[in-house]
Every structure is written in C-alpha cells, then in structure tokens.
Amino acid sequence: MPTGSLYTPLMPREDLTYLNAEPVVCHQPCGAVLNPFCQILNGRGWLCSVCGQTNPLPSQYQSEMPLQCLEENSTIEYITSRRTQPPIFLFVMDVCLTEDDFQALRESLLVSLNLIPEDAFVGFISFGKHVMVHELADDGIRAHVFNGSKEYTHEEISKKLGFLTPEFRSANPASQQTAMKYIQNAAMAEYSLDNILETIKEDSWPRTSKERAYRATGCALNVASTLLKSAFPHVGSHIMLFTGGPCTHGPGMIVGNQLKEPIRSHHLIEAKEAKHFKKAKQFYTELTKKCSENGTSVDLFIGAYDQVGLYEMEELCDHTGGVVVLTDSFTTSIFKQSFQRFFTTDQFDQLAMGHNATLEVKTSKHVKVAGLLGHAQSLAKNDQFVSTNAEYGISKTSAWKLSGIRPNSTYGFVFDTTESQERAVFTNAEFVTIQFITFYEHPDTSSRLRVTTVTRPLSQQQDLSSSFDQEAAAVLIGRIAVDKVLKDDVADVIAYVDKILLNLFKTFGEFRKNDPGSFRIGNNFSLFPQFIYHLRRSQFLQVFNNSPDETVFYRHVFNTEDTSNSLIMIQPTLTAYEQTDDEEERYQDDPEYASFKEFLNAPRIEAAELLTDRFPLPRFIDTEEGGSQARFLYSKLNPTTTHSNQGFLTQGGGVVLTDDVSLQTFMEHVSKLVVESA
C-alpha cells in the first residue's frame, strides 16, 4: 500500500486566515514557506521545518509571533500585491445542431451573459464546416473565416487576425485595439453578443441523409487557443466548447462524414483499427500543451446521443483543469443547470474558481514525491523533493500546472518513504513535513498563494494500523488503478489492486494459518475490502456497455472529486423505503390519504436534495421494479447467494442475474488466500 494523500486546495473554509502580504520563503533550493511547524529563533530567525536551514525573520515579524506561525493556521492564504487581468471566457459554439438543440443552446448562452461578472472578458467563435471568429462590434456583424479542413500554425492564425502587424509588436495602443476586436469586457460586449446570438443561423452546408454534418471541432479549438495566446498571453482563461456531434472534418477528425463509416469503439481502439484515432490523439495532445502553457482551461459541454470525440480530447480537459458536462441534448435540464452552476459564486460574491494555477509540493528529506494523480500538467521540476525509486501518475516533478481550479478540485499524491541517504537518521527522526503551495489568480484580479503544511509521525506498524484512513486509501487506490488502466490490461490492473488488498490484510490482519474462519481485521480496515470489491466492477475500470466517451467522462469526474463524492461513485449508497400494495390502488390520489402521497414522494424529495450541490448535475432516473430503466440500479447491486435458497424466494425475494460474485463470496476468497499464503 503506497503512502499518499488527497488534497483539495480551494476547499471552502470558514476558519481560513487571509494575509495581505508576501510569503516568507526559505533559501533556495528549498523554497518552503514559513509555517506553524517552523521554529522561531530568538525572534530574529527561523528554522525551516522542511530542510532545516536557518533563515532571517523579516523585521515586521520580530516583535510578535507571525500569524502564519500560529498552530491554527496550518492552511493560510496570502493575497499578494501582484494584480492580474480578469478571467476570459471564450465561447466556441457548434452550429451543426438540430433545431431544438440550436435554440436551447442559444438561449442558454444568452442567459449566461447575466452570470458572467461585468469586468470579465468574453469572446465568441462559431463553427461548422468552417470556423468563424466573430468581431464584437456595435456597427454590424463581422467575422473572420478559417478553412475547417486546414491545420493552421500559430503564426498563420495570428497574422489572419491581425496580431503580427508592426503596430502590435511595438505595443502601442493599436495592439490593444486588435485584441479588443475579438475579446471585450462583458459589460461592453453584451450588446454585440446579443446581436450575434440572435442572428446566428444553423449550419446550412448541404448534405444527404446518409452523411454526417461537416464539423471542424479541432480547427475551432486550435483557432480559439491561438486567439487567447495572441491577444492575452498567460492570462487565466476558459475555452468553453459546446458541441453536438463528432469532429468529421479537418484536424482532430474521429470519423468520416459518411454514416456507413462506424464511429470507433473500445474494441476498435484496442485492436488498433480506429483509423483516425492516433492522428486525432496526437493533435489534441499538442493542443493541450499550448493551452496549458498559456493558462487556458478547456471546458467541454456536450449535447449529443452520439459520441463526439471526448476520448481523443481527454488530455485537453484533464491536463488543463477543465470541466466536462456530458448530456444527450442541450434541451435537457442536466445541461442547462450544469452550465449555470459553472458560474457559481462564493461567499464573497466572486466566481468560485481560480485561474492560471500551479501547485508545488515540498517534503522533508525522509519523504519524496512519487507523483500526482489528477488533472494537471507536469512542469518538469525534477529537484530534491522528487523520488527516484517510484513513479505514479504525473511523476518526475514536484510542480504542476493546474490552469483551471475549482473548490471541488482534488489531487491525489503518492509519496515514497523508502528513500533516505541516512537510514539511521530516518529511524531516529520523529516527524516528516509535507507542504502544498498553490498559486492561482483569483477572479477579483488578485494573485493568491494558499499554503497547507502538515506533519506526520514516523510510526511503527501498530501506530499505522490505528491511523489508517480506509476511505482515503480506497479513493487513492482507485486513482492509481484508473491511471494504470490507461497503459495496462484491465485484468493486470485488477490483479494489482487485489495484491494490495492481500498484502494489507497479511500485514494488519489477525488469523491462524490455513484457517479462514479465524481471520479478523480491525474496524478501521473493515470497509476497505468492500470498497475494493466495488472498484473492481466499477465503470472506472470496466468498459463493458460504455462507449469510449462515457468511460472518459466517468474517469474525469472521479479524478476531480473529493474523498466523499469519490466513494459514492465507487460504492453508491442504497436507501430502502418500505411500502404496501396500496399504491396500486391509487390511494395517493385521494385527498384523505395525503400523508400516504407524501410518503411515496419522500424518495423523490430526498433525491432532489442530493442533486442540489452536485456539479455536473447527475442524471436522475425514476423507475420501478421491472421497469426499462431499472437496469441502472441492478447493475450496482451486490449479487447475493440467497436466490439459491427456496425459502428466500417464497418470502418475496428476487433474482439478480449477473456473472459477478457476491461481496460475501469475494470476502471468503480473500480470507482464504490470506491465511493460506501467510
């Protein structure tokens, strides 16, 4: 079992201390920030808890204890003097939609203009077979058109948009005018965007009933990223893509426009028979690097029954901190409410998000960083904090570019505790220190640094047993498994997870050799095997009955959420309500039985309350036993062995047909393997 942690940098906290100051930093090459675990030396210096170096204490902190050194401020946020640009939201709209979807999306975009802060910047691009960059002008509607079949270079796009003129290079006022043609302050651009959205038409490019629409998604994203990099380099921004079908034209194409050509499946990808896959994947990988370097987050809003190429675009949203909303149509409440929740505000009435974020980890010498599991891009900072023995996820670095970050954005870290130049020192040391340093641009244009410092004792085995966090461990193992399944066969990954479970039980379980009935495990380990059981059969590892796009969506959300929400995804909760046969008699329709009607509605009310804080908004399925949608519930149920008991069936039990073993059978098998291999 690897040592690790789950960290949510922007988790809302009522007790968080804000400090309007620059952080006090340790000498290089350490760079750790002053924290409660540092030792103050005679009021004039401080001893770094990470590297042990002595540093001078700034004069303003010599007369009294600095706030950042108080025990309750193990997490503190610095509001620095550096100011930034307000965030940018660049809408990229697919016009190859059905009439209903087109109207619904247009209305949602119009509504969103009231949700974006007035000082934020906005821009608009539409695409079908070709890509149109719209100017935000009051005196008419103008657009620059790009050939959707062509893979433009950065220079070609910049020149066509007017960014490589001598006036722009000399940084005179004309340069700002060029940028403001396409991206303007939301308050100024509202009229122009209203105009564009009211007059924009569905794609009219002719096609037969046997053809898919020509959709140049890849070209549109390439143009959008270049526009942001040219107009506002290294400014926190969002490319918000709204698409209703697969890319069938130009760079990033995943399928041809002829309907007789099937869209790729898991089987075709594994067999290397998806002819567009490799080229599309490479295109989006290069585009991801471009967006990440510029601090641009790519958010994907999908409204389609068919696949759109999310599998190929996986890195584009994963490595830039983007969100993914996957729905069947833009007319659904799932899309409409999720889109509005994207612009949720915090307690200070600011957008609940950060931009252009980076994250660094500092560790004391007995612990090294083995990797990050989550949505980030490596900054290739291979320093003294990086493990040379172990690699997990995004490794060989102690710093990552997050780009977009939200209050629920959670990152998994794996640490290597086997390294130490002086093993004797390791055994004598009492604590290890780990510091997380998150830099981000706040929507109010301030630059902020949130620092979290933790210390943990170097424990003996009995201490490890009592401090084991089975919930965090299950989520971390889940993230490791999801990362491994991208490179290895599913069977090998499941074998890896099983091995971790067996080794854990061999170490911390109590049993007599060759006696499965004697096996016992502590309370803080008791739920871990059932988490692993459900993880093995989850949609994060198993791709059966899911399209490639759906698989990527599930894994993306899992790698975003905190421990609690991730556990619900691994092992959903099941709440039972007892009812009589009176429902079939329709008593609930009689005013005299109003209380019975309330009882029947209780599950729906509770479900609605659960949906309130979820992002993206989950799909809510209301079904009954034997209903067409009941399969979604059956697929999550624990298969039981009781259906083989005739007495059970006579009491009204049902049979759940499945190839899976039950949790009970799984546990019996695990216990048997543990005691036999000890």
Image (cartoon, helix red, strand yellow):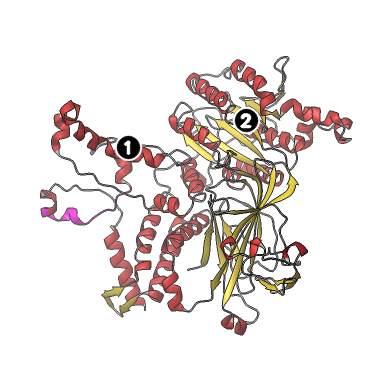
Q: Amino acid at mark 1?
A: Ile
Position of 391 compared to 330: left or right?
right
Residue 478 visible, this angle? yes
Q: Which residue is mark 1?
A: 605
Callout 1: 10 Å neighbours few (<14), some, many (20+)? few
Which amino acid, by three-letter code, is at mark 2? Phe
Distance (Cα) linking label 1 and label 2: 35 Å
Determine the image quadrant of residue 115: top right
In this rendered view, identify the residue nearer to me: 51 or 637: 51
Residue farthest front in this picture:
63
Tell me, yes or no, whether the highlighted magenta stretch contains residue 676: no
Magenta stretch bounds: 636-647
Left or right of 231, for residue 571: left
Residue 72: numbered disc = none
**Foreground: 403 or 591?**
591
Q: Residue 483 versus residue 32: which sits nearer the camera?
A: 32
For the point 88% across and 30% down, the residue is 167
Badge 1 or badge 2: first in the primary sequence: 2
Residue at (42, 73) in percent of width and height: 465
Q: Which residue matches tag 2?
A: 91
| Residue 385 pos. (x, y %) | 66, 67
Q: Position of residue 455 (x, y in %)?
A: 57, 69
Residue at coordinates 36% horizontally, 77% vertically from top-left?
677
Residue 436 % position (x, y) = 62, 60
The secondary structure type at the circle numbered 2 is strand
